[in-house]
Amino acid sequence: MSEDQRFDELARQARDLQGPSRTEFFSSLSDEEAHQVEKILQSEESINLSSDQARGFDASSAEETLPEVEGYKVLQPIGQGGMGHVFMAEQHRPVKRRVALKVIRSDTPAKEILARFNAERQALAMMDHHNIAKVLDAGVTKDGRPYFAMELVKGVPITEYCDRSKLSPNERLELFVQTCRAIQHAHIKGIVHRDIKPSNILVTVIDGEPVSKVIDFGLAKATLIGLHSRPSRKIVRGVMTHLELWQMT
């Protein structure tokens, strides 16, 4: 069984679970397994509003449980995963704008899942770069669930954009350079992404120009401050086909 098949099978098992059973299931997975299953179950965890849809996502059921968040009007669900739901929302104050709202699942979160959620939120908050999706706000919903509001990125994976737009080699390199600068900024801030791959680099168009956005810091590691507790066993994080050599040693 290939890596992708194994993750698909784990996702299939997760879909059949609800409430505490689902939370316990995710707690039993390694960081890599949990993250990849979340990626399968959600619709562009990175807030990709393209035509791609998450496998197993039931928008009608999510609409029935739109969270109440002070200062925001939650409009519609745009994705879900084992760790949280993602919604499009309108922020009312201090400014009016549309954002992506990531809210942890209503089930009682396992410590590991809650830690990963908070780690992603903290990693994004540490960075300020136009090629990295920004965290705009954070807090708890009216029923006590942690959330964070992010820049709403309307884009597609970088490889898909390049092929669809039939970009020249030089134009592709321009997007690559943008992405490298974003990763450099994260490294300067002491953040290692650990899951760089085409689906985590979205390209959106701003003022007629393509702009890359690095997203999904769910596996990020801080080298200056501890975002994750030290695991009791060595875990390889990320997708095997996109790992760097240092991650496999």
Image (cartoon, helix red, strand yellow):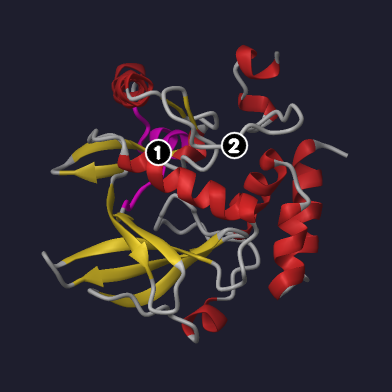
Q: Classify 10 Å Cα crowding around label 1: few (below 14), some (14-19), many (20 and above).
A: many
- Residue 86: where, in percent of width, then height? 45, 64
Q: Quadrant of the N terminus?
A: top right
Looking at the image, the residue that sits furthest to the right is 1
Q: Quadrant of the C terminus?
A: top right
Of 119 and 128, nearer the camera is 119
Residue 202 vertical position relative to residue 183 in the rendered view, above or below: below
| Residue where numbered disc 1 is placed | 123
Numbered disc 1: secondary structure: helix
Q: Residue at coordinates 62% horizontally, 69% vertically from top-left?
A: 108
Q: Quadrant of residue 176?
A: top left
Are circles 2 and 1 on residues that touch, CB within 8 Å? Answer: no
**18 sits left or right of 155 in the view:** right
Q: What kind of residue is marked 1?
A: Ala
Q: Secondary structure at mark 2?
A: loop
Q: Is residue 31 magenta?
A: no
Task: Name the residue carrying label 2.
Answer: 229
Q: Is residue 119 left or right of residue 186?
A: right
Which is nearer the N-term, disc 2 or disc 1?
1
- Identify the magenta region: 153-167
Relative placement, left or right, of 18 versus 132 is right
The answer to whether residue 120 is above or below residue 201 is: below
